[in-house]
Amino acid sequence: MISFVGLLIFASLVISGQLRIILALVAGCLLGLYYSGLSISDQKIATMYIGREVIITATVQDWPEVKNNQTRLHLGSPRFNYSTSALNCQIYATMSGVYDDIARSDQITLRAMISEGFGDYAVSVYRPTLISISKPDPPDYFVTIRNIFTKRIRQAIGDSEEANLALGFLIGEKALSEDFKAKLRAVGLSHIVVASGFCLAILSIFAQKSMRKVSRFASYAFAGILILSFIMVAGLSPSLLRAGLVTGSTLMAGYFGRKFHPGRILIYVVAISILINPLIIKSLAWQLSLASYGGIVLLVPMLKEYFYGNATSYIGEMVIVAFSAQLFCLPITIYSFGAFSIIGILANIIVTPIIPAIMALTFLIGIMPGFAPIVFICKILLAFQIAVIDVLSKVKWATVSIGSGSPLILMMYIPIVLLMLFLKSRTKYSFRPRYVLDKIPEYGKIYTC
């Protein structure tokens, strides 16, 4: 099977014309079906243990979440009853007590009763007995960096909701209280504490501007290194996988002087994500991340063209971006939670512009924890964010409940598509990249889009 797919891919590279597209599409579909079949098969094997007590050996995939004297773990590549074969699926484990010695990349062995899973988790376990913890060899140095960084920030800001929010902005730390998470959902701001494209975009811009005078290669290479390092520190969550693929493909295209149609990027991201993890399409975080990005790259340009033409408006653009992202996420949000926020756009306009400053200050605190002025300013901004979220969440009509779970809710994408077609017809906006010449002095070549 793999050999046949490889032959198709090779043929698509050497053959020109429409046949290349057909061969690449067939190869992608076959490869996707192959890996999807393996994942579904492994997931079925895991579900065969439901209702039985077994020994599980698995790897901690993400950072442990400690809440209400419980430690929640995301486990991957499990082996049951000391089997030598690891399954390509995930387990959600809830352990009683706080386990500070468990970190990402650790391999742990548990004795537990297997229960049904949810989302993209094949099975789940509740209150397992911890048998052993095995640290990776060589160690995960990015875990050490994150632990040191997080400790410094908590010591400087204090072990409080402000510190949790700052770490949520910067690296997607999942330490916020359930009460504050409910407030974020009420005002439509749950996405701000998820490590995603916002962080990667800031790193990319910083790297390219700081190294631009050295060389084009240095600026893009430095951006790539920073992005990979951030992903290794924060962890490859579904939303960060989407953001990493988008940012990486954009950087690669930019370096070679090319531009992609946003729809093509979305297709690439979906295809590569499914190849990496076929079950990721069941992840709500990945769905919302992809939908918000789709709204920004597909709807924002046409709305800007419709309302402003060639003119610019900072406030207007903020409103359009917030509206587009939330509109594309609205059907998924209602389907999953049965409710949506009416004041989400207002909350995004007030809160979002300050986030880059808080991220920069939090990063500087991690490097220079003893510099009091930075800590003071960061605390003021964080207190302002929390106060705004608290006030807006108390508005009685902030959230509207509808009902969840009905597939008909997803039909809401039909009027969204009709809106895009209307804007397309009125603005004549073209997503196709314009053909320009981009001179690259370092290599003395000319690349065309």
Image: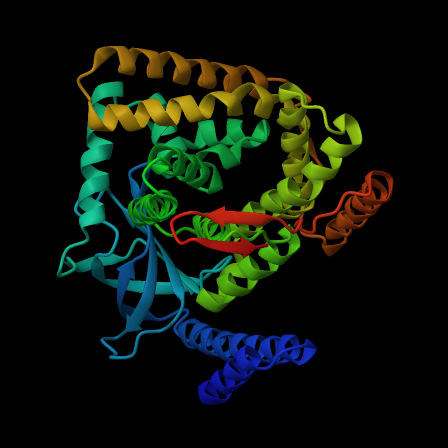
Q: Is residue 3 left or right of residue 318?
A: left
Tally of numbered tags: 0
* In the displayed structure image, the side of residue 237 where residue 25 appears, left or right: right
Residue 174 in sight here: no
The residue at the point 22 percent across, 34 percent down is 149
Toward which corner of the image does residue 85 lie, by quadrant? bottom left
> Residue at horizontal 52%, vertical 51%?
257
Q: Is residue 115 left or right of residue 437?
A: left
Residue 242 left/right relative to 82: right
Residue 357 against residue 250 in the figure, above or below: above
Residue 434 vertical position relative to residue 397 in the rendered view, above or below:
below
Q: Vertical placement of 72 versus 75: above or below?
A: above
User: Where residue 321 sits: x, y (%)?
Assistant: 64, 32
Q: In the image shown, does 14 or 36 lie closer to the viewer? A: 14
Tell which of 342 and 359 is nearer to you: 359
Q: Quadrant of the C terminus?
A: bottom right
What residue sits 51% from the left and 78% below the top? 37
User: What x and y, as percent, mark residue 258?
Assistant: 55, 53
Name the colour scheme.
Answer: rainbow
Depth order, front residue of 327/284: 327
Residue 137, given in percent of the width and then of the height, sits at 13, 61
Q: Nearer the viewer, residue 50 or 224?
A: 224
- At x 86% / y 44%, what residue is drawn? 425
Q: Is residue 258 above or below residue 1?
A: above
In percent of width and height, residue 54 lies at 29, 70
Can residue 368 be seen in the rendering of this structure? Answer: yes
